[in-house]
């Protein structure tokens, strides 16, 4: 029976539309092969739209999105819009509104891709970061006192709720079991300094761990996590961490897997509407040049299919990506691929079609 998915597409700013077009090209190709129907609804949101209309994310759009199955996002960010406006008003608002409490970031070095780590290869770099996505320092708690005066005080608090921490940790244990690779979950925190927030994380971590005797547990401070990620990335299988630490370590992780050109992630509400995005940003200087690598967006589509339960279709995308990275693309960096953005999409789609 044909399965149908209603997907909201937000191409967004900069190179977002270019890479989303390639992601959709590949999605449509596997959909046809796997008897899946994609019902796409486009939303024109982002910096350009904000500049011309003053609108960031209307309530009407949130109501419409609530009726769909997933959101596929290109990139948000515009050089003429003050930092924070689009990030908070669009990206974070979507994450919070739809309670996408997991930020899932697979980190995998594919064959044919260069890593800056000396003597490390695909067998060493294959782990997943699960970042809490709705709380911590991102919750927006805090404020100013006497702003703009010499006595100014700025407070930004990290909010960690028992419920929020537990559901994230539980998801991580489940994910680690389902992944069935290293069967090891590492909590990344800072228990030696953040003795309130990470006391809660640590207690919940070891409490939930009792329900998962098949999963080995480990702990690393966030600074040490950065060190090990460079020195011994093979030690990691699944990492669970809070919002801010997750943000930081996943940029480092993206670099060791080859760069922003192939890094993708999912903002997941396991019981609701999830959103998938390449994590590289809008790259304004490459806009319209057909130079940017669409593989991150194509991998975001893969994570979307996986999350929707379409594992076979997701695996077909990964196979295509692996083939093209191994045999065709010279370098994953923008402008150095040896192919244009759309040609990379064509190569992967063609391979999936069996050409
Ligand atoms: C990310 C980004 C966002 C974040 C920004 C754009 C708000 O860096 O998805 O990692 O900090 O979460
Ligand atoms: Mn980030």
Image: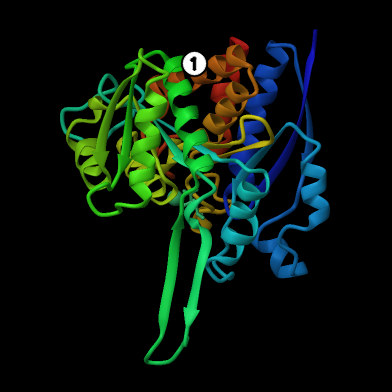
Q: Is 24 drawn above or below residue 35 in the view shown?
A: below
Which residue corresponds to mark 1? 319
Q: Residue at x 62, y 49 (%)?
A: 96
Of residues 304 and 162, the one nearer the viewer is 162
Way the structure is coloured: rainbow
Asked whether 66 or 206 is in front, the reply is: 206
Q: Position of residue 65 (x, y in %)?
A: 77, 42
* Nearer-the-camera pick, 212 or 240: 212
| x, y percent for residue 10 | 69, 46
Residue 225 in view: yes
The residue depicted at 61 percent of the width and 28 percent of the height is 304
Q: Nearer the viewer, residue 61 or 72?
A: 61
Which residue does the image show at 54% across and 38% down from the upper left?
341
- Mark 1 is surrounded, within 10 Å at the Cα level, by few (under 14), some (14 to 19) or many (20 or more) other residues, namely some
Where residue 295 sits in the image (x, y, percent)? Answer: 50, 33
Above/below status of 198 relative to 209: below
Q: Is mark 1 within 8 Å of ligand 1?
A: no
The answer to whether 86 appears left or right of 249 in the picture is: right
């Amino acid at each position: 029976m044909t399965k149908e998915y209603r997907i909201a597409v937000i191409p967004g700013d900069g190179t977002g539309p270019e890479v989303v077009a390639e992601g959709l090209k590949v999605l449509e190709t596997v959909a046809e092969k796997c008897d899946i129907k994609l019902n796409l609804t486009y939303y024109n949101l982002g910096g350009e739209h904000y500049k011309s209309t003053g609108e960031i994310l209307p309530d009407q759009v949130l109501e419409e999105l609530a009726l769909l199955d997933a959101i596929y996002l290109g990139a948000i960010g515009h050089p003429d819009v003050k930092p924070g406006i689009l990030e908070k008003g669009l990206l974070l608002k979507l994450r919070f509104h739809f309670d996408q409490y997991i930020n899932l970031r697979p980190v995998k070095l594919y064959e044919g891709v260069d890593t800056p780590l000396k003597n490390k290869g695909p067998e060493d770099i294959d782990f997943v970061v699960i970042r809490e996505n709705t709380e911590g320092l991102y919750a927006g708690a805090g404020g100013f006192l006497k702003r703009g005066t010499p006595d100014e005080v700025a407070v930004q608090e990290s909010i960690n709720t028992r419920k929020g921490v537990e559901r994230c940790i539980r998801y991580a244990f489940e994910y680690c079991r389902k992944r069935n690779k290293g069967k090891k979950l590492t909590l990344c925190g800072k228990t030696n300094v953040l003795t309130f927030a990470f006391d809660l994380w640590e207690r919940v971590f070891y409490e939930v761990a009792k329900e998962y005797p098949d999963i080995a547990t480990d702990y690393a401070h966030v600074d040490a996590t950065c060190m090990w990620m460079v020195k011994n990335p093979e030690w990691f299988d699944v990492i669970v961490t809070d919002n801010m630490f997750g943000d930081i370590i996943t940029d480092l992780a993206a670099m060791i897997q080859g760069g922003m050109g192939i890094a993708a992630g999912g903002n997941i509400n396991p019981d609701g509407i999830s959103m998938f995005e390449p994590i590289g940003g809008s790259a304004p200087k490459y806009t319209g040049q057909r130079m940017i690598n669409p593989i991150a967006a194509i991998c975001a589509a893969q994570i979307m299919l996986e999350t929707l339960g379409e594992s076979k279709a997701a695996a077909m995308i990964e196979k295509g990506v692996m083939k093209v990275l191994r045999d065709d693309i010279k370098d994953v960096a923008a402008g150095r691929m040896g192919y244009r953005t759309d040609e990379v999409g064509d190569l992967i789609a063609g391979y999936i079609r069996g050409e």
